[in-house]
Amino acid sequence: MEIRVLGPLEVVRHGRMVHIARRQVRTVLGILAFNANRPVSLERLIDLLWGANPPQRARSIMQTRISQARSAIGLDATTEDGVRLDSRIGGYILEADTDSVDILRFRHLLKQTETAPSGEQTIEQIRAALALWRGPLLGEETTREIADVHGHALESERLTAVENLLALELRSGKAGRIVDEFLPLVRDNLIREPLVARFLRAMHQAGRSTEALKLFDECRRWLATEFGTDPGEELRLAHQELLSQAGPEPALTNIPRFRPAIPKLLPADVNDFTGRATELAWVADLLLPDGRTSTAVIAIAGPGGVGKTALAVHIAHMARAQFPDGQLYVDLHADDDRPPTAREVLGRFLRALGVDGSTVPESEDERAELYRDLVADRRILVILDNAHSDSQVAPLLPAGRLCAVVVTSRARLGATLGATPLNLDVLDVEDATRLLQRMIGSHRAADADVPALCDLVGRLPLAVRIVGAKLAAKPHWTVDWITDHLRDEDQRLNHLVHEHLDVRASIAVSYRGLDEVAQRTLRILSDTPGPIYNWQVAAALDTATPEADLVLDQLVDAYLLDVAGSDATRTIRYRLHDLVRLFASERARIEDPPVVRKEHRERVHAAWLAMLRTAHRAAYDTDHLVVHGDVETSLPAGVGAAIRSQPLDWFQTARVGIMPALRQADRDGNTAVCWNIAVASSGLLELQRAFDEWHLVLDTAMSVASRANDVLGQASLLHQLGKLHADRQMPAEALRLFERSFALFKSIGHRHGTGVATAYVAMAHRFLSHHDEALDSYIAALDLLTESGDVGGQAHVLRGIGQIHLSRSDLAAADSYFQQSLELCRTHGPIRRVESQTRFWLGNLRVKQGRLEHAREQFTKVLVDCRDLGDITGVGQALRGLSQCHLALNEPELARATLLQALELAEQPRATLLLDSIRRDLERLRTP
């Protein structure tokens, strides 16, 4: 047996992956593996699992989880395959051989390097140790407590190993071969100066001295900002070596062009995927590029519940190594009223490939052309799930022979696409039997007619899982008993009568085994569009998220709910199979009055709005220059801290649920909720430059507000539409929309809204160089925003007035307004985005005044803040500002390196204003 925790938890026994359904069981097993061969007290396990908020029955739950861990991986009190999970006084211990836990193996390999006979063997052993790391410790199961106790120490051991590897590779003269591999790790650990110093030398040995200089400057500025210190002696010496040995300046044409990102969009794999060996081997062979002259397209067709998506996703995970340039995935929602258009999907794919939202082309044809160009010579796998027609699929196909596409559909597709068809039937008897045996244990299946039971449920994978889960949850039931039960048509309640594919009876068996709260939750989930999160259940049930987690675990254990992954805040994301959703919806119509179902939806919508506003405030520090309606919100307990710490990461995953929530609120007649969700999500979509989604959200909400004649909603949405057009460099259209917004706010006497619209009218005039009109509007807006108490809005306006004075070379007036803006941010803040923008313009002012050290101080602060905020454009502009300072201070090498760093960040397939500015700056540097 092998237990792996240097990445997502994996347990391998007899060469097969062991599926552990419960998240808490996986986490507990991981904690014990971290402490392999050392006892861990029960109190310590509770602290690491739940932190400061353990449930009331924590000790009892923990004992149950230990028992479940033993059962899940087949351990008892005797040694099994080098591993034993045993009790100790007050706790537990996982005893393991060196090769049975990857942490032990990692440390053993590093220990062996002390006696390795040669440098090459030492390098091989260190690389073998580092190769055991597959990602963050425990992956999605890591808690903050686990990271604090175990993560930092293990990460330090890893970094020490990398430092030793770099030293050995430098001595061998082959350090260049590992530069790309470890660059991200070094950038994340600039505090390790010996690591950075050795890496700089490795980059130079690879012929990448300019990049090394950029990395040194990045490290120097980071140390100054974070700790107020200069680089240490070893790092300074490495920098001096670079300066003395660097070759001539590279030609401008040799700097890197846009390099697409590596997308990794696959959903979670099915851990206990069973069967389909023939299909897997057949598809895997088709995916290989050998002998192909065009993109491989495989079209998997079959009825609902037959396992098309599970097969496609499992194939994709198995083939990841064959497609190192990325994996794209999209659910085309064939059964929805409004499936995503090819234009929308292409926009998502382009952004996943690293294309900035502002440079994504408008038309579908141009997007398809850019998409094909970016992936033409790359090995990328594309999964198009749940398609409804060839015409929906065709624009999403890459053209390169190294790429491959897997399409799934309930219809037979692909005839016009040159696709190779795979018609997926139910499992054969052997595979269905094996799946059920794995779920209930071979001892229970030994004397039973398992094939007969599988035949009763049509050997449909979903149905087999449901029956298996029911048996697993009811150990006193026998296979023969449930088989006889399902043979009785009266007991089956008309199930299994639609040939062999109707699984209502199977779902009903599992449903009846749930407690009342879990049944109610399943009915609620049938009314939850988009992805499912614990906070939605908590909101609907009016409870806290830990209690919702326990209910969701019940549904997962019963195979009525699937785990689909998690977001960056480690919030688990679930999905409901369409057949289970249909069953649950049927039960909801029977058991829950319409008014109750609507109350559930309203609580979820109130939670959506509360969470979006929480994320917006965390990302912008305030709600300045945003007009909200008077709508009740409710933030479920236990989720606010995670969103505040990572608002954009949370939103990146959650935003797919915005449009379904909008449409559901519209159907319920909740106009105010609909447009408030759109407004609350607008600023977040703007930061992620998801312009297509932003436009769709605003257009949908505007249609709802217009039908209801909700003037406040229309005014607020027009303001957001104006911002969208301004971000797309369409100032004239933005001005028109801002003026319409102003007129509507004024017509209903909304003073704050009028002030907000006036501020943006001024901004649009400034963009159009109408400086007199802009100044008049800014002054009017300042009075209204002061009256409304919008401090962030006032700081924004003061900065805008300062920019106008700077453009007129009235430096004293500009300085005064910039200082007033910063003072508001300091005294009422933090208001980091407004402050960073103001500091950037103050830095430009200081350059004009010749106060270069102060200018550099401003740009450095902007750079650090924008990096923390994830504002790539702000980072690029700050680097441009720093390059001006370096040049004026007679530091041309640093100026050039800084601009090259900005260019690398800003490089896009289509030019942006920032990109053009950086290129002009570089050309000026090259001009004598």
Image (spheres, rainbow, N blue to C red):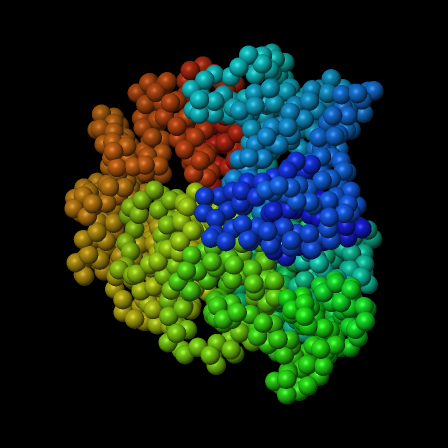
Say above or below: 308 vs 796. below
**Nearest the camera: 441 or 361?**
441
Q: Is residue 559 left or right of residue 99?
A: left
Would residue 477 be visible to someone looking at this image? yes
Q: Is residue 786 above or below residue 529?
A: above
Q: Residue at x 65, y 73 (%)?
A: 304
**Residue 517, how many percent across, how many down?**
48, 68
Q: Which residue appears at 27% of the width and 66% of the height?
A: 710
Q: Residue at x 48, y 48 (%)?
A: 54
Closer to us: 40 or 568: 40
Q: Is residue 850 left or right of residue 442?
A: left
Of all residues, the one furthest to the front in this rendering is: 89
Give the number of callouts: 0
Q: Is residue 359 left or right of residue 445?
A: left
Looking at the rendering, which quadrant does residue 768 occupy? Answer: top left
> Does residue 14 sit above or below 813 in this rendering?
below
Residue 560 higher or lower than 689, as above or below: below
Counting from the top left corner in percent of width and height, residue 257 is at 59, 36
Q: Is residue 923 something one can see in this rendering?
A: no
Name the residue furthest bottom: 490
Return the x and y of residue 826 as percentages of the image width and height.
28, 32
Question: Observer-nearest residue: 587 or 739?
Answer: 587
Residue beneath the point at 26% across and 60% down: 630
Whether residue 332 sits left or right of residue 301 in the image: it is: left
Residue 562, given in percent of the width and then of the height, sits at 60, 62
